[in-house]
């Protein structure tokens, strides 16, 4: 027969998690190789108005010149690169988690788009892309004869 006994040595679950994330787990992340397979998926919000599709992506810390946007055959592609800041020779790092990374996303837009008039704006770390709908895909009223 098994018995279950409660052991409390002053440790809480939060303390155990703190120890895990401050030590073991972070060291795994620190040593993770930077490869193309490590490109993270960029989270986005996609909405629609009568005239356009609007895509918003959070890219804090990414500069405008390191973000590429492309529209081909109703597919919007966003690629962003963030490069690691070089170390100073006289600095000794205790924690170094900010590494070069890439974010990427391809979004199939749900209708005909006019890729020639795409507008992009970056404000407070949020990239907003407005992709106008093509004339053929805009809703029209039909008169009954």
Image (cartoon, rainbow, N blue to C red):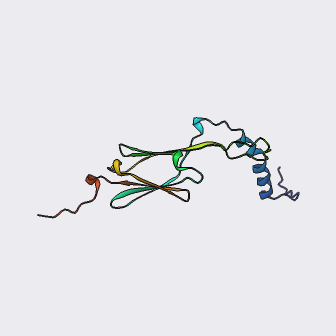
User: In the image, is 15 to the left or to the right of 66?
Assistant: right
Of 74 and 18, nearer the camera is 74
Image vertical order of residue 14 relative to residue 27, above or below: below
Of 36 and 116, nearer the camera is 116
Of 114 and 122, nearer the camera is 122
User: In the image, is 94 to the left or to the right of 46?
Assistant: right
The residue lying at 33 percent from left, 61 percent from top is 50
Residue 139 image offset from top left, x and y in percent: 27, 59
The quadrant of the rendering that contains the C terminus is bottom left
Residue 105 image offset from top left, x and y in percent: 49, 45
The residue lying at 28 percent from left, 57 percent from top is 138
Of 106 and 115, nearer the camera is 115
How many marks are shown on the rendered structure?
Answer: 0
Image vertical order of residue 139 relative to residue 28, above or below: below
User: In the image, is 134 to the left or to the right of 109?
Assistant: left
Residue 9 image offset from top left, x and y in percent: 88, 57
User: In the image, is 74 to the left or to the right of 82?
Assistant: left
Image vertical order of residue 104 relative to residue 142, above or below: above
The residue lying at 61 percent from left, 35 percent from top is 35
The residue lying at 55 percent from left, 59 percent from top is 124
């Amino acid at each position: 027969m098994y018995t279950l006994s409660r052991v409390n040595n002053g440790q809480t679950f939060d303390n155990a998690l703190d120890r895990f994330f401050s030590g073991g787990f972070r060291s795994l992340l620190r040593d993770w190789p930077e490869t193309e397979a490590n490109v993270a998926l960029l989270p986005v919000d996609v909405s629609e108005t009568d005239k356009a599709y609007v895509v918003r992506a959070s890219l804090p810390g990414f500069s405008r010149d390191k973000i590429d946007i492309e529209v081909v055959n109703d597919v919007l592609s966003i690629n962003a690169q963030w490069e690691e800041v070089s170390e100073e020779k006289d600095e000794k790092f205790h924690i170094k988690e900010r590494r070069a990374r890439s974010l990427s996303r391809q979004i199939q837009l749900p209708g005909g788009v006019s890729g020639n008039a795409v507008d992009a704006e970056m404000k407070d770390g949020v990239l907003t892309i407005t992709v106008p709908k093509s004339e053929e895909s805009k809703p029209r009223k039909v008169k009954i004869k």
